[in-house]
Amino acid sequence: MDKKKLAEFIGIMLGDGNIYSKSGTYRFVVTGHSEEDYDYLINYVKPLIKTLFNKEASIWKHKNKNAIALSVCSKSVIEKLISLGLVSGPKTMGIPTFAKKNKKLIANFIRGIADTDFSISFTKKKHNYPFITSSFSNKNFTEELKNLLKLFNIKANIYTKLTTLGNKTFIQYQIDIYGRHNLKKWMKFIGFSNPKHLTKIAIWNKLGYYTPHTHYLERVKLLKQ
């Protein structure tokens, strides 16, 4: 099994994946936005699953939600993922053991997380200063990501913030990677596989600034002009 692809897939699972292993049900699901993540899930993640596990992922759309998902039902695949450290339920895992001492595997692992759980944005004033960002509920995992990025000389900052969902307020740890130089190093050593990120960067490179509030298909159309 290709360890680079496997490290990336584990990152994807930690970003937008879930494992179900209960009462005889063995299934994993990878979820994304029905427009922004469609090309990524269908044209990248689905073939990745086929390559790694020789399984055809089913595709389904959430009712009344702007979300789609890929799912695979397989006891052997779930047992393999659990043996690598993934768990059913809340995500508590960090970088997989087999990837810890290999920078290329670490880069693939980070890319999988970033494609699913990070966003790339541009400062509001002129929309020309890039930053990569995400938030996690696990402080240790966020700090581990920051330390992994240091291996590529990418500087990240962590901020604590309170988030309210319904009647509950909880702490999240936001990780930000600011600036052109950090983005350049990110693209050189880690990169993105998700077109929703790549189209934003391509527009910024083409125009010298980003066009805010554009949807994925609008960005694709703009890049063809």
Image (cartoon, helix red, strand yellow):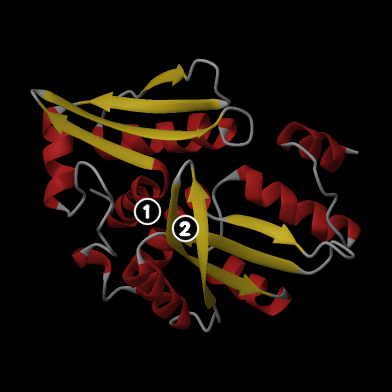
Identify which residue, 64 or 154, lies in the foreground: 64
Q: Which residue is mark 2?
A: 111
Task: Using the rendered view, name the quadrant where residue 154 is placed.
Answer: bottom right
> Dot 2 surroundings within 10 Å: few (below 14), some, or many (20 or more)?
many
**Image point (46%, 76%), residue name:** 149
17 lies above or below 118: above
What x and y, as percent, mark residue 93?
A: 25, 59
Q: Are marks 2 and 1 in contact (CB under 8 Å)?
A: yes
Identify which residue, 91 or 57, lies in the foreground: 91
Q: Which residue is mark 1?
A: 11
> Dot 1 surroundings within 10 Å: few (below 14), some, or many (20 or more)?
many
Count of numbered circles on the image: 2
Is disc 2 placed on a helix, strand or loop?
Answer: helix
Task: Using the rendered view, name the quadrant where residue 73 is placed.
Answer: top left
Marks 2 and 1, the one that precedes in the sequence: 1
67 lies above or below 104: above
**The C terminus: image quadrant:** top right
Is disc 1 placed on a helix, strand or loop?
Answer: helix
**Image point (11%, 33%), residue name:** 76
Query: In the image, what residue type sits under mark 2?
Result: Arg
